[in-house]
């Protein structure tokens, strides 16, 4: 919020400022409840929100390296990478941070 305030009300006679945001591992760190809430607030129909929830929750992964096999783990955060919906879901979440 302070950054938005500074962008819209820059101090007089101030030097230019660069802002950098690190989005490394951003797709892996999307918190599902926040994403689903932002989609609901954006006006998506409840049926579509439920469909997207079923797409995100109860996802499991197991990794094989040679003959070694990892334990099965539930993926509790993130959007599926390599999917068509992944970037759209991430953008939907970050767009909710913008003030109206």
Image (tube, rainbow, N blue to C red):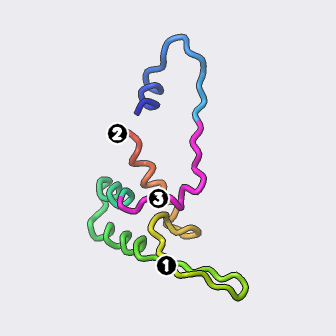
Residue 22 in magenta stretch: yes
Other residues around mark 1 within 10 Å, as few (<14) / some (14–19) / many (≥20): few
Disc ID at residue 100: 2
Q: Which residues are magenta?
A: 20-33
In the displayed image of the protein, which residue is found farthest to the bottom? 67
Q: Main secondary structure of the magenta part?
A: loop
What is the distance, in whole Å, between disc 3 and disc 2 at their CAs?
22 Å
Residue 49 spot, x, y in % from top left: 32, 66
* Residue at 42 percent of width and 30 percent of height: 2
Label 3, on which residue? 30
Q: Nearer the viewer, mark 1 or mark 2?
A: 1
Instruction: Determine contact: label 3, label 2, CB under 8 Å.
Output: no
On screen, residue 47 versus residue 76, left or right, reads left
On screen, residue 82 versus residue 65, left or right, reads left
Please name whichever residue, 70 or 49, is drawn nearer the observer in this view of the structure.
Answer: 70
Label 1, on which residue? 60
| In the rendered image, the vertical position of residue 13 relative to residue 79, given as above or below | above
Residue 13 spot, x, y in % from top left: 55, 11
Residue 8 spot, x, y in % from top left: 44, 25
What is the distance, in whole Å, between disc 1 and disc 3 at their CAs?
16 Å
């Amino acid at each position: 919020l302070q950054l938005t305030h500074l962008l819209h009300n820059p101090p007089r006679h101030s030097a230019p400022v660069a802002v950098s945001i690190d989005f490394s591992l951003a797709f892996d760190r999307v918190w599902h409840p926040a994403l689903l809430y932002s989609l609901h607030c954006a006006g998506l129909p409840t049926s579509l929100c439920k469909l997207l929830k079923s797409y995100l929750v109860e996802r499991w992964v197991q990794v094989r390296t040679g003959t070694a096999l990892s334990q099965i783990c539930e993926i509790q955060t993130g959007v599926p990478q390599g999917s068509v919906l992944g970037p759209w879901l991430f953008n939907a979440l970050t767009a909710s941070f913008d003030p109206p």
